[in-house]
Image (spheres, rainbow, N blue to C red):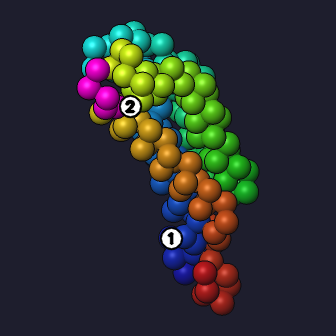
């Protein structure tokens, strides 16, 4: 029996969550946390903890998957986006408030970069949570 047929749905969810977290971390690093149509915040939403928790969490998750420590990989895969989300909410509170109130953002819409990063981060967190509760390796009888 090949090793790929022994992998359960949770195994692939772990890899997918790591890929999403890595993509979100790199994207946030590239845009440097600048949101807003007029860039009025000048990186005020950037925090290195967001970037490095996502990238580091993805690398740790992949390393633990290679070592077949799926339980720890699930925990790392879920903790990293959760930490990044909490810091992101703290750092971008004023940006979101400005958009809703219309102080610095007269068009009352979110920057597409903000939406892209938020979706990547949310997907990384949701997929990591799904990976926690699903089997990583199929049973010996062939079930999942």
- Nearest to viewer (mark 2 / mark 1): 2
Q: Residues within 10 Å of mark 1 (few under 14, many from 20)?
A: few
Q: Residue most toward the bottom?
A: 141
Q: Quadrant of residue 133?
A: bottom right
Closer to the camera in the image, 133 or 103: 103
Q: Is residue 27 visible?
A: no
* Residue bearing the label numbered 1: 4
Q: Which numbered disc, 2 or 1, marks the residue that appears first in the sequence?
A: 1
In the image, residue 104 lies at what x, y percent? 36, 15
Q: Are marks 2 and 1 in contact (CB under 8 Å)?
A: no
Closer to the camera in the image, 106 or 81: 106
Q: Is residue 10 above or below residue 116?
A: below
The local secondary structure at tag 1 comes to helix
In the image, residue 5 lies at what x, y percent? 51, 76
* Image disc number at residue 114: 2
In the image, residue 54 lies at what x, y percent? 55, 34
Q: Which residue is painted at 54% across and 70% down in the image?
A: 9
Q: Quadrant of the N terminus?
A: bottom right
Side of 27 relative to 124 (left or right):
left
Q: Is residue 66 above or below residue 31?
A: below
Q: Quadrant of the C terminus?
A: bottom right
Range shown magenta = 106-110
Residue 111 part of the magenta segment = no
């Amino acid at each position: 029996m090949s090793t790929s047929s022994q992998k359960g749905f949770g195994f692939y969810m772990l890899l997918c969550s790591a890929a999403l977290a890595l993509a979100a971390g790199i994207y946030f690093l590239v845009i440097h946390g600048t949101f807003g149509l007029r860039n009025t915040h000048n990186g005020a939403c950037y925090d290195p903890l967001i970037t490095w928790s996502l990238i580091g969490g993805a690398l740790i998750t992949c390393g633990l998957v290679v070592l077949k420590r799926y339980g720890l990989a699930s925990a790392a895969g879920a903790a990293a986006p959760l930490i990044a989300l909490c810091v992101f909410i703290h750092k971008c509170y004023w940006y979101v408030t400005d958009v809703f109130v219309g102080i610095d953002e007269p068009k009352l819409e979110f920057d597409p970069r903000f939406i892209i990063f938020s979706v990547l981060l949310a997907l990384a967190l949701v997929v990591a949570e799904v990976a926690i509760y699903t089997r990583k390796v199929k049973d010996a009888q062939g079930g999942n």
